[in-house]
Amino acid sequence: MAQSQSNRRVLVLPGDGIGPEIMHEALRVVHFFDRRHIASFDIAEDLVGGAAYDAYGTPLSDATLLKALASDAVLFGSVGGPKWEKLPFELWPERGLLRLRKEMALFANLRPAVVFDALAEASSLKRELVAGLDLLIVRELTGGIYFGEPRGIETLADGSRRGINTEVYDESEIERVVRVACELARKRDGRVCEVDKANVMESGGLWREVAQRVRDTEYPDIELSFMYADNCAMQLVRNPKQFDVIVTGNLFGDILSDCAAMLTGSLGMLPSASLGEADATGRRRALYEPVHGSAPDIAGKNLANPLACILSLAMMLRYSFDMGEEADLVENAVRRTLAAGVRTNDIAGSGMRGVSTREMGDAVLRELEHLV
């Protein structure tokens, strides 16, 4: 395992709702690593979202942004809640997260869909279809139809209105996200499936052309295949274990990653990472966050599932600090916790007692002690 050193700079942004509760449990894992001299981190903490608005009058202060830009990684909780719903759009808590993604230039969103054996029955699909599932969706995050111009709603000569959104991708945008997918595939099963709608969209044809070129010139060891997005959605619920790494644009990635999420049985189990461009030293700006939202209905009640946040921490270890063994350690502790029958309410089966957020954290730490 990595030797203990203290120059790993992490900015922790717990945010709103259940964010502070789940982040507390993730940080207990960080403190465990430090206490056992496995690894140490320089941890700074600040406010984001509604909590930042209440304190600073903005969902992300300039000072907090500067801390994020200077950090090696950002560990993020959740933002939003009914308290701030009547604020002007530009002050919504979610704008803090969007500004972070933009200013940190995070273009590749990583969404793993992993089914732990103990939770295979919780999936909406039959156990034999999902048991052992381990796929990764790499979604381009800063281009495509969500950002393309022209866009808007215009009034036509006859008084009717027309909505316009434009799917736009430059070669360089496609190249860099395909490279990320291929690099990740090299550490997995070596297979990448590029997903598009090249049969009806010229931008999809460009995706295929660029992906093939990147693979042929830079990653000849990677097996590259292509699939139309509608077929991919069908295959995810028909035979999801055929996939290793899926790489796709912003719109299709948004849809397919949520589809894949439900294969696992609970949003409370899903981590994610958003990565920027590698600099000359290989360092990438990165933000790690659980997929679930702020869940204001259970906030402050010690009921939230902290595992997605703990697994986001594991992704941070793996992708920002090249600490694969330590990431495996955290993931195995989660796996053993689930195998022991420990469940929060969102993943508890019939007749099972749901434990508290704190109790789930206790269980993970016990397994870590056994594994080290």
Image (cartoon, helix red, strand yellow):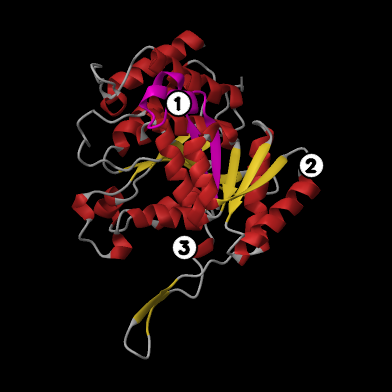
Lower position in the chain sequence, tag 3 or tag 2:
3
**Is any part of residue 301 visible from this angle?**
yes
Cα gap from disc 1 to disc 3, whole angstroms: 36 Å
Mark 3 lies on a secondary structure that is helix
Q: Residues within 10 Å of mark 3 (few under 14, many from 20)?
A: some
As drawn, 132 above or below 187: above
* In the image: residue 152, left or right of residue 139: left
Q: Residue at x 22, y 42 (%)?
A: 296
Kind of residue indicated by mark 2:
Pro
Q: Which mark is residue 30?
A: 1
Residue that numbered label 3 is attached to: 146
| Discs 2/1, front | 2
| Earlier residue among tags 1 and 3 | 1
Taking the spot 26% from the left edge, 26% from the top edge, the residue there is 345
Q: Residues within 10 Å of mark 2 (few under 14, many from 20)?
A: few
Specify the label residue 220 is tagged with: 2
Q: Please provide the residue range marked out in magenta.
A: 110-139
Where residue 306 appears, x then y in whole percent?
35, 29
Secondary structure of the residue carrying tag 1 is helix
Q: Amino acid at mark 3?
A: Tyr
Image quadrant assignment for residue 351: top left
Labels 1, 3: front one: 3
142 vs 87, left or right, is: right
At x 73% / y 39%, what residue is drawn?
Answer: 222
Residue 372: image x %, image y %?
Answer: 52, 11
Front one among 248 and 43:
248
| Residue displayed at 39% across by 29% down | 123
